[in-house]
Amino acid sequence: MFSIIQAAGWPIWPLILCSIAALAIIIERFMSLRAAKVAPPKLLDEVLAVTRSSLPSADVVDKLHGNSVLGTVLAGGIRAAMADPRCDEAQLRNAFETSGRIATHQLERYLNALGTIASAAPLLGLLGTVVGMIEIFGAQSPTSGSNPEQLAHGISVALYNTAFGLIVAIPSLMFYRYFRGQVDEFVLTLEQGAERLLPQLLQRTPRR
């Protein structure tokens, strides 16, 4: 592997840094975008059961907030109902939407960086290709002819960087699309959870 890096020349180092960053993001997102951390399957039913007769205590809401991303969104609506028992549907929806925007931002963390790596890696590979081509043309001399050693080095720089750029870009793009799909599904789950809790909170709040 080290011999390949040496043969590829300096243009491969930015690609290596990109590959390390992409791998770190992929591992972090796999750990963070788990259903147990985002939207536990039974959490919504438990919250609906707790809030059916009355609003829970502040300690229970705090625990719900720290439970998961879905818990954070639901806790935002419950806190709005607790802060103003006479709040209307528009105010509760606004509380849910505010919590939802924060939750969505949390779910999308680092995805822009991963998408940027997926887009930039082929360009960095192309840069290495151009550098290799420059070395190839530099190996040509009108007087002494071509330098086979420098010519071979230029070809290796061009090919290795092109290949490594694609090696970094293709998995990064695939995982970016996969995580985007997961985030979209989780956002839909959060919206559905808020919609199911909203009528119950309205029943618990006195009308003006």
Image (cartoon, grey):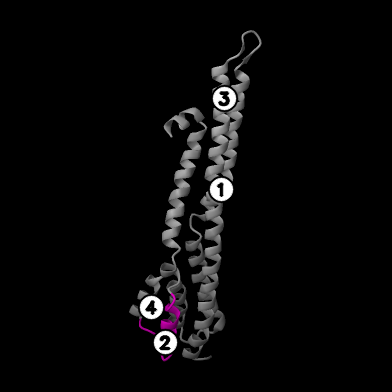
Circle 2 is placed at which residue position?
Answer: 49
Residue with the most extreme left position: 59
Cα–Cα gap, marks 4 and 2:
14 Å
Classify 10 Å Cα crowding around label 4: few (below 14), some (14-19), many (20 and above): many
- Residue at image position (47%, 32%) is 4
Cα–Cα gap, marks 1 and 4:
43 Å
Q: From the viewer's perspective, tell me whether residue 22 is left or right of residue 133.
A: left
Q: Nearer the viewer, residue 147 or 69?
A: 147
Task: Single out the mark in the foreground, 3 or 2.
Answer: 3
Q: Residue 163 lies in what quarter of the image?
A: top right
Sequence-first disc among 4 and 2:
2
Query: What's the residue type where badge 3 is placed?
Result: Gly
Query: What's the residue type where badge 2 is placed?
Result: Ala
Point out residue 82 in the picture as x, y percentages from the top left corner.
Answer: 42, 82
Sequence-first disc among 1 and 4:
4
Cα–Cα gap, marks 4 and 3:
64 Å
Sequence-first disc among 1 and 2:
2
Circle 3 is placed at which residue position?
Answer: 154
Sequence-first disc among 1 and 3:
3
Q: From the viewer's perspective, tell me whether residue 35 is left or right of residue 143.
A: left
SS label for mark 3: helix
Point out residue 182 in the picture as x, y percentages from the top left corner.
Answer: 52, 64
SS label for mark 4: helix
Task: Please give the range of residues in magenta.
Answer: 41-57
Q: Which mark is residue 170?
A: 1
- Please say if the residues under marks 1 and 2 sit with CB atoms less than 8 Å apart: no
